[in-house]
């Protein structure tokens, strides 16, 4: 499966999903570049009758995937969120 849990910070867990990325690119995320992450899970909006969109958060600069993932996990903890999706 393409989901990994990384223990971060003070015991908090953030699930990082690479499924969508792997489905699009055919391999696990790797390399250096500007990485995008959807931080949080899309929630059902009953009033609108659809899922709300989680806008990507871009990690600026040429960072390795592991550096960018750690930055996304930090942001998730700051937002009190336990799920991050790697954008394809």
Image (tube, rainbow, N blue to C red):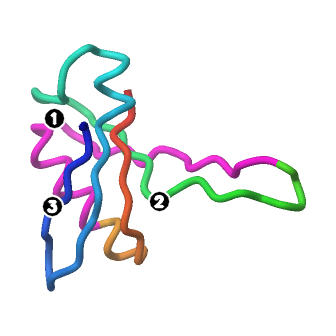
Query: Residue under circle 3?
Result: 6
Expressed as whole percent of the image width and height from the top left, the position of residue 82 reads 36, 68
Counting residues from the start of the chain, the first of labels 1 and 3 encountered is 3
Q: Residue at x 44, y 48 (%)?
A: 38
**Vertical side of 78 occupied by 20: above or below:** above
Range shown magenta: 50-74
Which image quadrant is residue 7 in?
bottom left
> Who is closer to the viewer here, 59 or 30?
30
- Tell me, yes or no, whether the highlighted magenta stretch contains residue 67: yes
Q: Residue at x 86, y 50 (%)?
A: 49
Query: Residue under circle 1?
Result: 62
Q: Which residue lies furthest to the bottom in this view?
A: 10
Expressed as whole percent of the image width and height from the top left, the position of residue 13 reads 24, 71
Give the left or right position of residue 14, taking residue 49 as reference: left
Give the left or right position of residue 29, taking residue 24 as reference: left
Q: Residue at x 89, y 61 (%)?
A: 47
Expressed as whole percent of the image width and height from the top left, the position of residue 16 reads 28, 51
- Of the 4 image quadrants, the one containing the N terminus is top left
- Of the 4 image quadrants, the one containing the C terminus is top left
Q: Is the residue marked by circle 1 packed among few (<14), some (14-19), or many (20+) residues within 10 Å?
A: few
> Who is closer to the viewer here, 70 or 13?
13
- How far, Cα to Cα, is label 1 from label 3? 22 Å
Q: Is mark 3 on a helix, strand or loop?
A: strand
**Label 2–label 1 contact, CB within 8 A:** no
């Amino acid at each position: 499966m393409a989901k990994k849990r990384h223990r971060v910070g003070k015991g908090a867990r953030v699930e990082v999903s690479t499924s969508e990325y792997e489905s699009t690119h055919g391999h696990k995320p790797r390399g250096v570049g500007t990485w995008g992450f959807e931080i949080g899970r899309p929630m059902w909006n009953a009033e609108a009758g659809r899922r709300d969109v989680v806008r990507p958060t871009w990690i600026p600069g040429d960072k390795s995937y592991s550096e960018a993932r750690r930055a996304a996990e930090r942001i998730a903890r700051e937002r009190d969120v336990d799920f991050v999706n790697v954008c394809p």
